[in-house]
Amino acid sequence: MTTLRTAGRTDVGQLRENNEDVIVTSDRLALVADGMGGHPGGEIAAEVVAGVVPAAFTGQSVAELEAAVRAANWAIRDRALTQTGLEGMGTTVCAAGLLATGHVALVNVGDSRAYLFHEGSLNQLTRDHSLTAELIERGELQEDEAAQHPYYGILTRALGVGSDVEIDRTTLALAEGDRIVICSDGLFNELSSQEIENAMAEGGDASAIVDTLIDGAIDHGGRDNISIVVAEVAA
Ligand SMILES: [Mn+2]
């Protein structure tokens, strides 16, 4: 019986007063939700995702994980309709779930990311759904300039903002020693992918890697909430 071995941490960072990121670490699911900033409901929207998705995902299929995220979208909208001041609240979600087949299902909405660390190198598995990501894809903006751009942080997709949501999904077969890294933008805006790769390459305990990365992001300024979950498939 395979399980997902997960280690994760979320940190408020150096500048923000609230932590609107929420993580899930279980033997079946690794998830990061980054509540939309500047909105009182951001944290609540992220918490709804962390409640609904683990309850609805049983490891059946990537379609089931996608349906769980869709259910979270409805739950956020329901909550926003019934509570004053929460209209328009939203969140990102990036989640990896272990399937009964031993494969890993991956879903993504917004600008939280999943990376695969395989044989010493780190590769981004997800596409960011943001205006700056679109500018980068069109060659009009450099990756390392995104966080300083006036459009930075404006999402083109998020949970909670519409009655339906387009969800990116894929299924992965992990090799022995592979690790998945799921994180909020508070990590990759402070640390380059090379710095994240270096920390992963040092190896060792996943929770020690998580601590190294969070500490690194704080040292670089910690301008946003920082969340990271490292996951691997264990026999
Ligand atoms: Mn963030």
Image (cartoon, grey):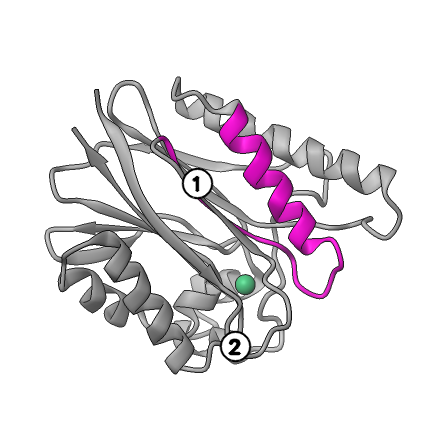
Residue that numbered label 1 is attached to: 95
Q: Which mark is residue 217?
A: none
Element under label 2? loop
- Residue type (three-letter) at the residue carrying disc 1: Ala
Q: Nearer the viewer, residue 80 or 136?
A: 80
Tell me if residue 68 comes above or below residue 227 in the rendering: above
Tell me if residue 21 comes above or below residue 165 in the rendering: below
- Residue type (three-letter) at the residue carrying disc 2: Arg
Outermost residue on the right side: it is: 84
Question: In percent of the image, x 32 and y 72: which residue is there?
Answer: 192
Question: In percent of the image, x 13 and y 64: which residue is there?
Answer: 202
Magenta highlight on residue 66 = no
Which image quadrant for residue 221? bottom left
Residue that numbered label 2 is attached to: 223
Q: Is residue 177 visible?
A: yes
Element under label 1? strand
State yes or no: Cβ of the residue under disc 2 lies below 8 Å from any atom of ligand 1: no
Which image quadrant for residue 59? top left
Question: In percent of the image, x 19 and y 33: which residue is there?
Answer: 234
User: Where does the image place residue 62, in percent across and percent down from the top left?
Assistant: 41, 25
Give the magenta-colored segment's residue range: 28-55
111 with respect to 27 (left or right): right
Q: Nearer the viewer, residue 128 or 16?
A: 16
User: Where does the image place residue 23, in percent across and percent down from the top left?
Assistant: 48, 48
97 with respect to 91 (left or right): left
198 with respect to 17 (left or right): left
Mark 2 touches mark 1? (CB < 8 Å):
no
Question: In percent of the image, x 62 and y 28: which residue is there?
Answer: 71
User: Where does the image place residue 45, in percent across and percent down from the top left?
Assistant: 67, 46
Of the image marks 2 and 1, the number of the one nearer the N terminus: 1
Which image quadrant for residue 163? top right
Q: Quadrant of the C terminus?
A: top left
